[in-house]
Image (tube, rainbow, N blue to C red):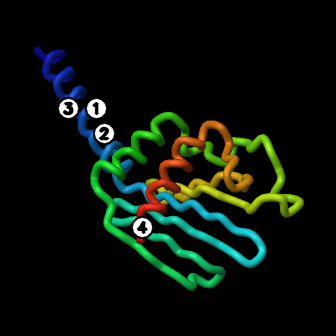
Amino acid sequence: MKYIVLAIISLLALKSCSQEADQQKENMIFTYDEFSRGFANSYIITKEDITVKSGTIDDLIKSRPITAEEYQNLIDLTEAIDIRTLNAYESDSDERNRDAAAHAELNVKWNDVVYNSKTFDKGNAPKPLVPLVNAIIRLAETVE
């Protein structure tokens, strides 16, 4: 009888921890930045909205609400990569180092910690990050 009660308590505790982790993932903030000499774009996606900042000093700021489905799609895409090791992913080109491409970075804030990618060429993200980066860009393009 004691073992049954212990097993039930253990299962309930594990379920509670799992639900907490899911809720924390639902509060991720995604930031994608593109920049070069003379221009900068920043796309910020939270659970509430999509914000696009264009210009070197936030000359133009536009935003729109995000749907639950759009946000969940981003969360689902993070399942394929380990956010904690975002800076370990390498780009296969370095055109940005000779001004042949703009710089780009992906940042994900999760559990009050910001995970940063290494800088990569705009349009050529490290392979594991491509689906997430493309999804962020597609969402940003819908902001008018």
Q: Quadrant of residue 105?
A: bottom right
- Residue at 55% x, 59% y is 114
Say if 72 sits above or below 66 in the image.
above
- Tag 1 near tag 2, CB within 8 Å: yes
**How packed is label 1: few (under 14 Cα within 10 Å), some, or many (20 or more)?**
few
Say which element carries label 2. helix
Q: Which residue is mark 2?
A: 17
Sequence order check, earlier mark of 4 and 3: 3
Who is closer to the viewer here, 19 or 138?
138
Separation of disc 2 and disc 4 at Cα? 36 Å
Say which element carries label 4. loop
Residue type at tag 2: Cys
Sequence order check, earlier mark of 4 and 1: 1
Residue type at tag 1: Leu
Q: Which residue is mark 1?
A: 14
Separation of disc 1 and disc 3 at Cα? 5 Å
Residue 97 is left or right of residue 132, and the answer is: right
- Residue at 10% x, 14% y is 1
Q: How far across and how far down the image is residue 110, in percent?
A: 46, 54
Residue mark closest to the camera, 2 vs 4: 4
Residue mark closest to the camera, 4 vs 3: 4
Sequence order check, earlier mark of 2 and 3: 3
Q: How far across and how far down the image is residue 87, in percent?
A: 67, 48
Say if 17 sits above or below 114 in the image.
above
Q: Which residue is mark 4?
A: 143
**How packed is label 4: few (under 14 Cα within 10 Å), some, or many (20 or more)?**
some
Q: Which residue is mark 3?
A: 12
Q: How far across and how far down the image is residue 15, in percent?
A: 25, 33
- Tag 1 near tag 3, CB within 8 Å: yes
Separation of disc 1 and disc 2 at Cα? 5 Å
Residue type at tag 4: Val
Residue type at tag 3: Leu
